Image (spheres, rainbow, N blue to C red):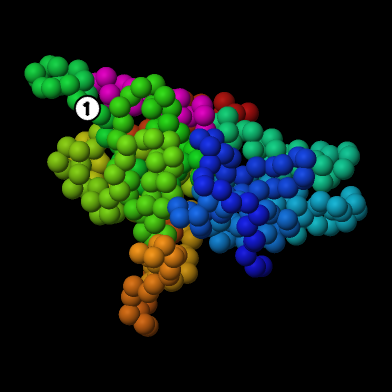
């Protein structure tokens, strides 16, 4: 599988350019190539199953919800132009290939299962049914993220009101802003639109809550620096980039009011798997009495797993993500440079697991719930 050629380029998106979209007039599936951000904004077309697999594995698309939707379109692309007899043979192969691209995010397998179920019920054209299923998941993701953003914004409103009340009781000046720390990119770039953790930010901003976001750089790959800062800048949200290890210091000195992160997989017990480094932020937040929230659609909950530490597969990625780094040089050229000595052994775990005891609440499209088995079983049963 090779890289996908860019088909469109412009100076950046409108506030709600979809991260993946289907152009019905031309029958094209288009994605924002996130490996080119923040220095180049390019849309590329996914033409084949191989293109979809490459986009996921190379992280042209990333974020659990977006990976799932991309995989659904990947099934459609594998069937497009095929008759139903050929399509029936292709479906299992396509699902297997897409499922193998990224092991940790549960939305990948969830979305593929949803598409398979739709195809099993299909009495007409399988390719058309696959497209319909992908478009339905696409729409569901937008709706779920918008709803969870509203629920999260209400929680931020409560924190902002409480901060003002404390200041008034203590005779202090009115606070200037609510300070939120996030990790990695859980914004619109991690979903079809809105995002998870950043949906909470965007919806709170729309309410008029004065916000400031501390953005972890998020090594390796620097999704915080490259993607979250880019997104927040596009939306006009005040933010400051910090190194990954600065969060604890900021919390100790009262510069953080709450943490909001995303999740690639959350278990029935409330354990949260997210980008490597999330666990350390949760520990620091707990030690300093700071709320630590996880924003996620219900599709990111794996009700079949209990213990996140032992049951969630943790992806290990290539060494060069750690030993090398890319960026824009002083002449405006994108360059890749080596950081570590030749021959250095590198460990590159992509995710870690934050135990439920460190999570203040799970912000979902169904509301904010506690991160424990009782609350999650109640949520699971309500979905039937």
| Residue at figure coordinates x 47%, y 65% from the top left | 317
Q: How many marks?
A: 1
Write down the quadrant of residue 338 in the picture.
Answer: bottom left
Pick the residue in front: 336 or 341. 336
Q: Helix, strand, or loop for circle 1? A: loop
| Residue at figure coordinates x 45%, y 52% from the top left | 38
Would you say 339 lies left or right of 380 here?
left
Residue 323 colored magenta? no
* Mark 1, residue position: 176
| Residue at figure coordinates x 84%, y 39% from the top left | 122
Pick the residue in front: 372 or 113. 113
| Residue at figure coordinates x 38%, y 27% from the top left | 205
Magenta extent? 145-162
Relative image position of residue 249 (x, y in whole percent): 18, 48
Relative image position of residue 382 (x, y in whole percent): 57, 26
In this view, the residue farthest toward the bottom is: 343
Would you say 193 lies left or right of 93 here?
left
Can you say which quadrant of the picture contains the N terminus?
bottom right
Res. 216 in view: yes
Q: Is residue 225 above or below residue 236?
A: below
Res. 313 in view: no
Relative image position of residue 342 (x, y in whole percent): 36, 82
Q: Is residue 188 above or below residue 216?
A: above
In this view, the residue farthest toward the left is: 171
User: How would you classify the magenta stretch by its main secondary structure?
Assistant: helix
Residue 160 colored magenta? yes
Pick the residue in front: 188 or 110. 188
Q: Is residue 382 above or below residue 334?
A: above
Relative image position of residue 84 (x, y in whole percent): 89, 50
Would you say 244 lies left or right of 332 here?
left
């Amino acid at each position: 599988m090779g890289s996908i050629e860019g088909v469109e380029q412009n100076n950046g998106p409108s506030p709600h350019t979809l991260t993946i979209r289907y152009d019905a007039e031309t029958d094209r599936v288009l994605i924002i190539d996130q490996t080119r951000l923040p220095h180049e904004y390019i849309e590329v077309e996914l033409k084949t199953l191989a293109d979809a697999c490459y986009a996921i594995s190379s992280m042209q698309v990333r974020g659990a919800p977006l990976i799932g939707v991309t995989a659904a379109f990947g099934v459609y692309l594998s069937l497009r132009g095929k008759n139903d007899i050929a399509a029936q043979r292709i479906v299992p192969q396509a699902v297997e290939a897409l499922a193998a691209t990224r092991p940790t995010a549960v939305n990948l397998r969830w979305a593929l299962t949803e598409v398979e179920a739709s195809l099993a019920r299909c009495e007409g054209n399988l390719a058309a049914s696959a497209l319909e299923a992908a478009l339905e998941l696409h729409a569901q993701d937008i709706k779920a993220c918008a709803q969870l953003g509203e629920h999260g914004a209400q929680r931020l409103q409560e924190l902002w009101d409480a901060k003002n009340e404390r200041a008034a009781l203590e005779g202090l000046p009115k606070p200037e802003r609510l300070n939120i720390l996030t990790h990695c990119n859980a914004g619109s770039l991690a979903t079809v639109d809105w995002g998870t953790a950043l949906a909470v930010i965007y919806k709170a901003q729309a309410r008029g809550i004065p916000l400031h976001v501390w953005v972890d750089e998020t090594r390796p790959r620097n999704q915080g620096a490259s993607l979250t800062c880019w997104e927040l800048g596009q939306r006009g949200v005040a933010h400051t980039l910090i190194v990954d290890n600065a969060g604890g210091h900021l919390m100790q000195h009262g510069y953080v009011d709450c943490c909001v992160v995303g999740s690639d997989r959350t278990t029935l017990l409330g354990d949260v798997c997210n980008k490597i480094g999330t666990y350390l932020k949760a520990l620091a937040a707990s030690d300093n009495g700071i709320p630590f929230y996880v924003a996620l659609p219900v599709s990111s909950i794996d009700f079949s797993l209990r213990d996140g530490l032992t049951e969630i597969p943790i992806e290990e990625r290539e060494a060069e993500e750690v030993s090398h780094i890319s960026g824009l040089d002083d002449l405006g050229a994108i360059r890749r440079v080596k950081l570590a000595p030749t021959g250095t052994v590198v460990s590159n775990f992509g995710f870690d697991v934050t135990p439920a005891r460190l999570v203040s609440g799970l912000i979902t499209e169904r509301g904010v719930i506690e991160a424990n088995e009782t609350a999650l079983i109640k949520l699971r049963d309500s979905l039937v």
